Amino acid sequence: MRKEVLELNTAFLSSVSVVGRKESEGPLGPLFDLRDEDDRFGGKTWEEGESEMQRLAFNTLLAKSGREDRDVDALFAGDLQNQCVGSAYGLLNFDLPYFGLYGACSTCTEGLLLASMALRSACELCGVVTSSHNCVAERQYRSPIEYGSQRAPTAQWTVTGAGAFLLGKDADGAVKLARGCPGRVIEMGVCDLANMGAAMAPAALDTLLRFFRATGKRPADYDRIVTGDLGFEGGAILEDLMRAEGVPLGDRYADCGQMIYDRVGQDVHAGGSGCGCSAAVLSAYFLPKLQSGELRRILFLSTGAMMSPDSIKQGKAIPAIAHLIELEAPTR
Amino acid sequence: MKAFCDALLPFVWAFLVGGLLCVVAQVLIDKTALSPARILVAYVVAGVFLGAVGLYKPLADLAGAGATVPLTGFGYLISGGVKKAVEEQGLLGALTGPLTSAAGGIAASLVFAYIACLICKGKPKD
């Protein structure tokens, strides 16, 4: 019988967030570490821009934490591009073992979970980097932005952003990644590419319920329960589903996709999405609040919709996943 | 004054009909799970069908560019091309007709898109 919840007790030593223009103009704008005005980050293509975001994020992370790439035992990285080339190109100049991941928009917590599991076994210092880029995702999953296609009201806006995290074993004075609950692949028959929130909410529900049942905890035990990018549609669906299960989230529920943009002012329809969404918001907003003690204990789930452009064309429903980490403020 | 109104009327119809076709598409985007690609294809097919049964011509006569510019107009163009080709070549015209009549539109799209790529640099969506 497996363990639904893993005891990890690893520490966030440092983190960096990098975003594009729209994100820097949003409600969390001033909190992000680095930003670029035209989303190109000096690259010739959007894809190069995304790789450069990852390189910049990780380079800054090393500088900020006073480490070198040779100190890192393993780096877990992923993005939304085919074959995760965004991460491969972005991180190829660093001298460290690299593990490429694909969890769609759940890559952030997937990486943090795997890094923590590695720290509990063979490693001392691990890094996690993940990113997404609006123009890259649009070209790959829908149509190139140059085509000028119209977006549905339930469509989410892929965040142009990256988050880089350094994890270690020692938890004194650092935000602790206490426990984790890895997600299961959940597919509930949602085929609509323009409504990924609806596809992902059941995965978040599944992981949350398994975590609460295994630990005996309730939503009230946490200051916040945060999902990565269910957006306004998916978030509402998750709240309904949790209420129907008798575990209402109440007003401690938050979603990074809802937080990162001004829904009305920036015309983002159903909110933000993408690997970079939860990564950038975790780094820029939630980790500092945990570090200062303003938030004491939160649950953080990145949610991913793991379809491919071909699977959609073949009429298959969208499989989703949500990986959960339990974060605690430093003990004083 | 009447001459002015008469001169203005074709424009009014063009905008009304063209606008209405756009409204239908917007409603399909907002209220259904149809992807933009499916809506575009549906428009072309609708234009072919309406053109084939003779219902689109009166609309094109009334609204001019308001009926021919939207994608239903492209379908209408294709249906006209098929009719003409079938008259000239028999059943083979069903295959040669559509692309022949649409050739100008398709070539223009390709050429202008290519020129746009050469002189413009993509910017992130706003």
Image (cartoon, coloured by chain):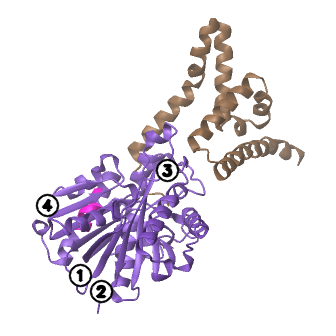
Chain colours: A purple, B brown
Tell me, yes or no, whether the two marked residues, 1 and 4, touch with CB atoms within 8 Å.
no
Q: Residue furthest bottom?
A: A332
Labelled disc at residue A96: 4
Q: Chain of mark 3?
A: A
Q: Which residue is mark 3?
A: A187
Q: Is residue B85 visible?
A: yes
Q: Do callouts 4 and 3 point to residues on the same chain?
A: yes
Indicate which disc, 4 or 3, sits on the residue closer to the N terminus.
Answer: 4
Q: Which residue is mark 1?
A: A171
Q: Give x and y (percent) for residue A189.
A: 55, 47
Q: Which residues are magenta?
A: A51-58
Indicate which disc, 2 or 4, sits on the residue closer to the N terminus.
Answer: 4
Q: Amino acid at mark 1?
A: Ala
Q: Give x and y (percent) for residue B75.
A: 65, 29
Which is in the foreground here, disc 2 or disc 3?
A: 3
> A247 or B38: which is nearer to us?
A247
Q: Residue furthest left?
A: A70
> B30 or B50: which is nearer to us?
B30
User: Is residue A135 rendered to the left or right of residue A68?
Assistant: right
Labelled disc at residue A330: 2
Callout 3 secondary element:
loop
Q: Chain of mark 4?
A: A
Indicate which disc, 3 or 1, sits on the residue closer to the N terminus.
Answer: 1
Q: Amino acid at mark 4?
A: Leu
* Residue at 54%, 46% in the rendered image: A191
